């Protein structure tokens, strides 16, 4: 199988107030990124309009609603998400193994019900990138962020999920714990020149890819740029550099 082009590893976060605004950004970035993340803000404002339209026009969508509820509710929600034709959806790993298994059941129940090229893959959210050690302790999680993330990633893998959403700082530990085929989608990625905003566990695109991330979720450094396509292309170039340089050589340089 041919390696994925660098630009396809970029998922752009459409954290916008309306479907119209999201569509405007997506049109500027068509052919420059691999996927678009539709999250809580625009989904709350307008429902599945943006996700449905993007899928219909051939774009790949990561539906980032982080389902976290009783298993029956999550099963039904995951089924509806899969029926939209999204490529990725996520649930909170802290909802427990039964809830994660229910999400998979919901997705699998759509097989044969719609004509899509590839099935929806289910990811578990481990620890939000805005949370540091003090925040985790405050809500009752024991251990460092890395320890909590690995514990939840292993649980997600046991539940049969395709992978996790995790900070760049925990990629290596997840790979060590869960193996090379476990999908890792990484937010908290910022080019060197960008501000960290409200995320604490961050890294550059180059370092995240070298650590083993499969996809990078990037929002404001691209969507807030004067030329979003050029910003995406620059990040793709960083990714290409990381893919072309062996980790051992990068460590020596």
Image (spheres, helix red, strand yellow):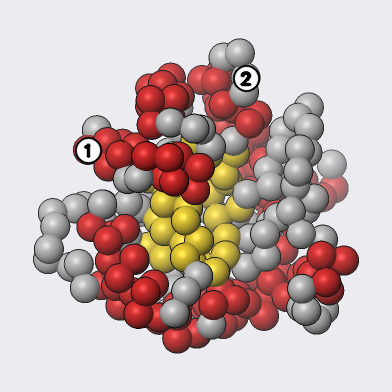
Q: Nearer the viewer, residue 146 or 140?
A: 140
Would residue 100 be found to the left or right of residue 201 on screen? left
Image quarter of residue 211: bottom right
Residue picked out by circle 2:
225
| Mark closest to the chain's N terminus, 2 or 1 | 1
User: Residue placed farthest to the right in the image?
Assistant: 134
Specify few, some or many for label 1: CA neighbours under 10 Å numbering under 14, 14-19, or 20 or more: few
- Residue at the (69%, 47%) spot, across then down: 188
- Residue at the (57%, 65%) spot, across then down: 125
Could you tell me how many numbered marks the image carries? Answer: 2
Q: Position of residue 176 (x, y in %)?
A: 67, 74
Mark 1 element type: helix
Residue 251 visible? The answer is yes
Mark 2 element type: loop
Q: Position of residue 221 (x, y in %)?
A: 65, 29
Disc on res. 128? none
- Residue at the (28%, 66%) spot, across then down: 79
Q: CA distance from mark 2 to mark 1?
A: 27 Å
Q: Position of residue 113 (x, y in %)?
A: 12, 63
- Residue at the (32%, 51%) spot, across then down: 86
Q: Nearer the viewer, residue 129 or 134?
A: 134
Would residue 151 be found to the left or right of residue 33 on screen? right
Residue 206 visible? The answer is no
User: Residue placed farthest to the front in the image?
Assistant: 45
Relative to 60, is 212 above or below? below
Disc on res. 56? 1
Q: Position of residue 206 (x, y in %)?
A: 69, 41
- Viewport quadrant of the C terminus: top right
Image quarter of residue 25: top left
Image quarter of residue 151: bottom right
- Viewport quadrant of the N terminus: bottom left
């Amino acid at each position: 199988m041919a390696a994925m082009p660098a630009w396809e590893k970029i998922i752009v976060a459409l954290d916008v107030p309306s479907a119209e605004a999201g569509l405007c950004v997506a049109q500027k970035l068509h052919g420059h990124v691999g996927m678009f993340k539709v999250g809580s803000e625009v989904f709350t404002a307008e429902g599945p309009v943006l996700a449905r339209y993007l899928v219909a026009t051939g774009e790949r969508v990561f539906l980032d609603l982080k389902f976290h509820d009783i298993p029956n509710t999550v099963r039904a929600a995951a089924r509806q998400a899969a029926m939209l034709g999204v490529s990725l959806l996520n649930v909170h790993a802290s909802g427990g193994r039964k809830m994660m298994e229910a999400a998979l059941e919901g997705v699998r129940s759509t097989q044969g019900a719609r004509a899509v090229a590839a099935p929806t893959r289910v990811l578990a959210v481990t620890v939000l990138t805005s949370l540091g050690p003090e925040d985790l302790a405050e809500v009752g999680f024991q251990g460092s962020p890395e320890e909590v993330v690995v514990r939840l990633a292993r649980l997600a893998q046991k539940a049969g999920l395709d992978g996790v959403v995790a900070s760049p700082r925990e990629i290596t530990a997840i790979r060590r714990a869960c193996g090379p085929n476990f999908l890792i989608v990484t937010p908290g990625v910022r080019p060197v020149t960008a501000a960290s905003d409200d995320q604490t566990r961050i890294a550059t695109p180059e370092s995240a890819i070298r650590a083993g991330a499969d996809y990078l979720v990037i929002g404001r450094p691209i969507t807030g740029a004067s030329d979003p396509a050029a910003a995406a292309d620059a990040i793709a170039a960083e990714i290409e550099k990381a893919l072309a340089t062996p980790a051992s050589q990068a460590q020596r340089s």
